[in-house]
Amino acid sequence: MPDLSEKVFIITGGNGGIGLGLAEGIAEAGGAVAIWARNEEKNTDAVRALQDIGGEAKSYICDVSNEEEVIRTLASTVKDFGRVDGLFANAGRGGTGTPLVDTSLEDWRKVMAVNLDGVFLCLREASRQLISQGSGGSLVAVSSTSAIHGAAGNEAYGTAKTAVTGLVRALAVSLARFQIRVNCLLPGWTVTELASPAFENEYFREVTTKRTPVRRWANPSEFKEVGAFLADPSQTFHTGQQVCVDGGDTIF
C-alpha cells in the first residue's frame, strides 16, 4: 500500500459497493475519506466501517446531479478537512433496462444526469480546488466495461460510461500542467447493490461468469488496492489511462 497519510480524498457514492471498497483502500493506506452520497443511514454505516479500520472519515449528503449541492458540499469538505487531494467520481445509477426504441427522453436524461453530468460537475469543482491549492492531485472517474463492449438493451448507461472515458482523456491533457493526474476505472461484473438484479438472475449470472476468464464476479473489497494505487501521489507519470479490473472479460 502507498502512504496516503495527510491526504484527503472525496469518494462520491462511497457508502457501499465499489465506492466503499475504494474508500477502504484509501483509509488502510492512511488517507482521510469524505463520502458524498444521498442515503444518510448508509453514509453513517460507511463512516463507522472506515473508522473501525483506523481511518478518518466524514460523510455528506450530496446529489451529484445537482450543481448547487456539489459546489456546497465541496466547500464543506474543504472547510472540515482543510484541503482535498483528489476525488473519485464513483456515484452512479443503473440504466433503464429497456431497448433504445422504447426509452423515453426523460428516462435517458435521468441516467445522464448522474452518470455523466454528475461526473462532469464533480470533476470540474475538484479541478478548481486542486488548481487553487497548487500542489497537484488525483482525479478518478469510475466508468464501466460497458464503455468497451457496449450495453445492448441498456444504451443510456453504456453511452454515459463511454462519454466519461472521453472526458478523462481530455482532462488528463489539460490538467497535466497543474500536476493533476486524471484516470478512469473500468470495473467488470461486481457484486454490488446496483448490480444485484443482474446477479440474482441465474441465467445472466451464469452467462457472464462463463465469459469471464477468472470464472466469477468481483467483490467490492477487491478494489481497495486499486483505489490506493490511483490515489498514490508518487504515480506522477500515470495519467489519462483506463484501468480495467474485470477478470479478463473484455479481452476474452
Image (cartoon, rainbow, N blue to C red):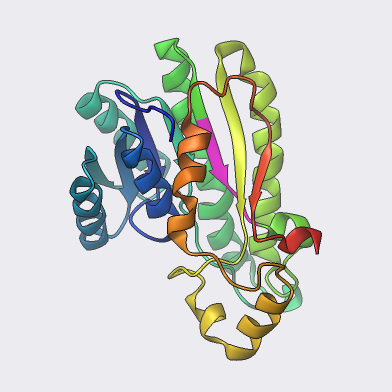
**Can residue 123 be seen in the rendering of this structure?**
no
44 relative to 83, above or below: below
Measured as percent of width and height from the top left, residue 88 is found at: 47, 40
Residue at the bottom extreme?
Answer: 202
Q: Residue at x 59, y 68 (%)?
A: 95
Q: Residue at x 51, y 36 (%)?
A: 229
**Can residue 6 be seen in the rendering of this structure?**
yes
Magenta stretch: dominant SS? strand
Residue 62 within the magenta-colored segment of the rendering: no
Residue 182: quadrant of the picture: top right
Front residue of 119/30: it is 30
211 relative to 10, above or below: below
The stretch in magenta equals: 139-144
Measured as percent of width and height from the top left, residue 37 is found at: 33, 52
For the C terminus, the quadrant is bottom right
Q: Residue at x 65, y 84 (%)?
A: 206
For the N terminus, the quadrant is top left
Front residue of 83/106: it is 83
Front residue of 5/83: it is 5
Q: Is residue 124 left or right of residue 12?
A: right
78 relative to 36, above or below: above
Residue 94: quadrant of the picture: bottom right
Q: Is residue 107 left or right of residue 83?
A: right
Measured as percent of width and height from the top left, residue 173 is found at: 69, 22
Measured as percent of width and height from the top left, residue 200 is found at: 51, 85
Front residue of 235/67: it is 235
